[in-house]
Every structure is written in structure tokens, then in C-alpha cells.
Image (cartoon, rainbow, N blue to C red):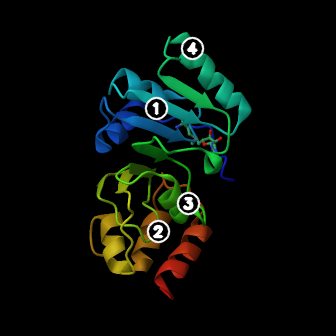
Amino acid sequence: MDRLGPEDYQSNRHIRKLLRLAGAAKDDVFYDLGCGRGQLCVLAVKEFGVKKAVGIELHRGRAEKAAANVEGLGLSGRIEIRNEDFMGSDLRDATIAYCGTYEAEDDVSHFERELPLGSRFVTLFLPFVGVVPTSADYPFYMMERPFRVTKDLSFWISKVLFRKASVGELYQELDTDREYRYDKRTLRRLVKERFGDA
Ligand SMILES: C[S@@+](CC[C@H](N)C(=O)[O-])C[C@H]1O[C@@H](n2cnc3c(N)ncnc32)[C@H](O)[C@@H]1O
């Protein structure tokens, strides 16, 4: 699976869970990084009342579908769909960003640089490797800028699994988790790089 990911659609119940976790409300500007059909932006505006939502989508066909959907709902004034790579996006006005694709090498430093202080970043299935989530409602984890980085692997794992466990147990849980579909080789490499020989 490349980083474009599958075009799978999260249910509205999952989307509400992540927007609740992020505390989305009327003063927020919500970014969905890899927005697919744009449904997260729609619920963020319609149900949580955020003042603006921006959906970024690299795949042209998906971005076009999302934009048509937003227009059909009469929400073009508050939802912007951009057909671009989110690693090149201007995120300066974001108060909340969500990214449901797996972590790539430079994500932590990139988003640390690009997201404003105080903004919240929500991920799916795992927080960034080595970053301590400020809260979680599985499968979602929220981290805040500035990111709190830890070198303590067992502390980080306890925040991921919500219990004390070894790194072997973490991998075993992920291996047997039917929902977790990310690139495990990259995860192991990031764990090794950030925590040393774990
Ligand atoms: C799992 S889908 C998200 C689906 C979406 N949440 C929905 O409910 O429709 C992930 C999306 O991220 C997009 N994507 C992956 N990497 C991207 C990137 N670097 N920039 C922009 N979009 C990206 C993929 O094309 C894909 O549509």
C-alpha cells in the first residue's frame, strides 16, 4: 500500500469520534490531510460548526468528487478542497489537522514546523512514533503543538496501548489487529531510529 492509501470511507460515527476528541468548535479551522470524498470536512462544518474546513487530496478524481459533493451541499463558502500534496500545503491557519495515512519519515519535523503553536493534530491507529499523545479515543490519537517527544519507549507504548507492555507485545498487538493495515516495516524502522535498539 503506498501513501495514497485505499479509498476507504470512514463511517460518520468514526468521524464524529475524532472531531469530538479534537474538541472541534466554531472558532476552529479544520484540515483533513488526505480528505478522500471530503466527508470529514462536511461533518466538521455541519455538525461541529467549525468556521472553515480545508480538505487536501492528492488524487485528482477524489478531489473533484469531494469538491462536487461540497458544492452540491451548498457548503463551498466554508469548505475548500485543494488538489495538492499535503506535504506542500500551507497550514498556517489550522487549529486542528487530521491525517489518516501512516507516518512517513519526515512527518514529525514537517508538522512541527508547519502547524501553528497550540494546534491539535489527530492521527489514526498510532500517534507519531516517539510523540506523546495528549489524549486518545481509539483508533484516534491527538497530539498538540509543540509536540511532546519522549525517548522512553515503555512510556510511549503505555500511551499507545493504554497499558504497560514490551515492544514485542506492541508488535504482536498490531500483527493481530485486523484494523491496523499500515506499513509495519516503516514502523519498526522509526521505532529503532527514535528509541535506539529496541
Ligand atoms: C484512507 S483515504 C481517506 C478517506 C477519507 N477520510 C474519506 O473518508 O473519504 C486517504 C486519502 O489520503 C490521500 N493522500 C495520501 N497521501 C496524500 C498526500 N501526500 N497529499 C494529499 N492526499 C494524500 C489519498 O489519496 C486518499 O484519498
First in sequence, mark 2 or 4: give its number. Answer: 4
Residue tagged by mark 2? 129
Q: Quadrant of ligand 1?
A: top right
Asked if one can make out residue 5 in the rendered structure from this viewpoint, the answer is no
Circle 4 sits in a helix, a strand or a loop, which is it? helix
Q: Residues within 10 Å of mark 4 (few under 14, many from 20)?
A: some
Q: Quick check: marks 2 and 3 in contact, CB under 8 Å?
A: no
Q: Residues within 10 Å of mark 1 (few under 14, many from 20)?
A: many
Does residue 40 sit above or below 158 in this rendering? Answer: above
Q: Amino acid at mark 1?
A: Leu
Residue tagged by mark 4? 71
Circle 1 sits in a helix, a strand or a loop, which is it? helix
Residue tagged by mark 1? 40
Q: Amino acid at mark 2?
A: Val
Asked if one can make out residue 95 in the rendered structure from this viewpoint, the answer is yes
First in sequence, mark 3 or 4: give its number. Answer: 4
Q: Is mark 1 within 8 Å of ligand 1?
A: yes
Residue tagged by mark 3? 110
Circle 2 sits in a helix, a strand or a loop, which is it? loop
In the image: residue 195, left or right of residue 6: left
Where residue 9 sits: x, y (%)? Answer: 53, 34
First in sequence, mark 2 or 3: give its number. Answer: 3
Gap between marks 1 and 3, in whole Å? 23 Å
First in sequence, mark 4 or 1: give its number. Answer: 1
Circle 3 sits in a helix, a strand or a loop, which is it? helix
Gap between marks 3 and 4, in whole Å? 31 Å
